[in-house]
């Protein structure tokens, strides 16, 4: 029996532009858990309406709204009253984009835009790519980012982030490892309860949620490269393939197998 909800989502990748991926979700009722991406995200709502949860939100987005999200920003977009909605989202590798523009980082002053000019620009970008159009697409993408983003200004780390910096470095360096909360707390010189409070104040989520998100992003990268599902699950520290299946579907609204089937050139 075909899961029709799962067939409503397609990922497009192309070898002419390995640094970008397009997600196309059509008439989907999916709700998403709070999550973050390692990439810059640029998207447009095609139909329906949703509530965009982010640090400056919540914010209502509807057909024609543009959504812009930096790497590491926790967010969720969920349809109003569970009604179907449709959207397209580009995920652009952060290192590649910053290198192209000669900056260390970028920020979007507004994470949602509702003007027709922005919608037209992003609509043209969020199309499946062919090899002949790769050069023009790259130029258009960089122009779009320069229009909507600005170089990120150096900021002083919040006291909470400084306090848990050792744990954050550990989690990012080896998301597949499994240090306990107690071990992470000891590395930061805190009790476990205090560490969890400080970590959530710094990131907005618990250490466990943060690590799971890193593992899922890592598994997604491996699957996009053609790594087998069982191998990706093992490499990112999941107990088995079934654990990755459940977590991936809960966070991305499709199974890892469906995601992996979107091959370059699709």
Image (cartoon, rainbow, N blue to C red):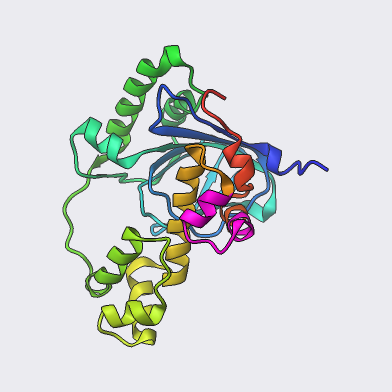
Is 62 on the left or on the right of 209, as rendered?
right
Q: Residue at x 41, y 21 (%)?
A: 16
* Residue 194 shown left or right of residue 178 in the figure: left
Q: What predominant SS class does the magenta segment belong to?
A: helix
The spot of residue 82 in percent (x, y) is 68, 53
Range of magenta residues: 230-246
Q: Is residue 51 visible?
A: no
Q: Is residue 42 visible?
A: yes
Expressed as whole percent of the image width and height from the top left, the position of residue 15 reads 44, 24
Where is residue 213 drawn, in percent x and y? 46, 58
Left or right placement of residue 101 versus residue 137 in this view: left
Residue 263, compared with residue 246, is above or below; it is above
Q: Residue at x 40, y 30 (%)?
A: 18
Residue 59 as seen in the image, left or right of residue 138? right
Report the quarter where the C terminus lies: top right
Q: Is residue 84 above or below residue 97?
A: below
């Amino acid at each position: 029996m075909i899961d029709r909800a799962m067939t409503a989502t397609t990922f497009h990748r192309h070898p002419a532009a390995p640094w970008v991926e397009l997600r196309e979700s059509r008439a989907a009722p999916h709700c998403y858990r709070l999550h973050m991406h390692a990439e810059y995200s640029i998207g447009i709502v095609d139909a329906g309406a949703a509530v965009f949860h982010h640090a400056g939100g919540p914010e209502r987005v509807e057909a024609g709204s543009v959504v812009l999200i930096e790497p590491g920003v926790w967010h969720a977009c969920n349809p109003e009253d569970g009604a179907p909605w449709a959207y397209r989202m580009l995920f652009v590798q952060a290192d590649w984009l910053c290198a192209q523009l000669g900056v260390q980082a970028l920020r979007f002053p507004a994470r949602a835009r509702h003007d027709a000019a922005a919608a037209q620009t992003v609509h043209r970008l969020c199309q499946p790519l062919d090899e002949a159009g790769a050069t023009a697409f790259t130029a258009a993408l960089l122009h779009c980012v320069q229009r909507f983003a600005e170089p990120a200004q150096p900021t002083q780390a919040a006291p909470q982030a400084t306090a848990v910096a050792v744990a954050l470095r550990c989690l990012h360096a080896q998301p597949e490892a499994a240090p306990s909360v107690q071990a992470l707390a000891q590395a930061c010189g805190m009790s476990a309860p205090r560490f969890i409070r400080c970590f959530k104040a710094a990131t907005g989520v618990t250490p466990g949620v943060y690590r799971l998100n890193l593992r899922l992003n890592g598994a997604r990268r491996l699957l996009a490269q053609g790594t087998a599902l069982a191998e990706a699950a093992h490499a990112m520290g999941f107990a088995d393939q079934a654990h990755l299946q459940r977590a991936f579907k809960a966070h991305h609204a499709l199974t890892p197998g469906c995601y992996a089937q979107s091959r370059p050139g699709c």
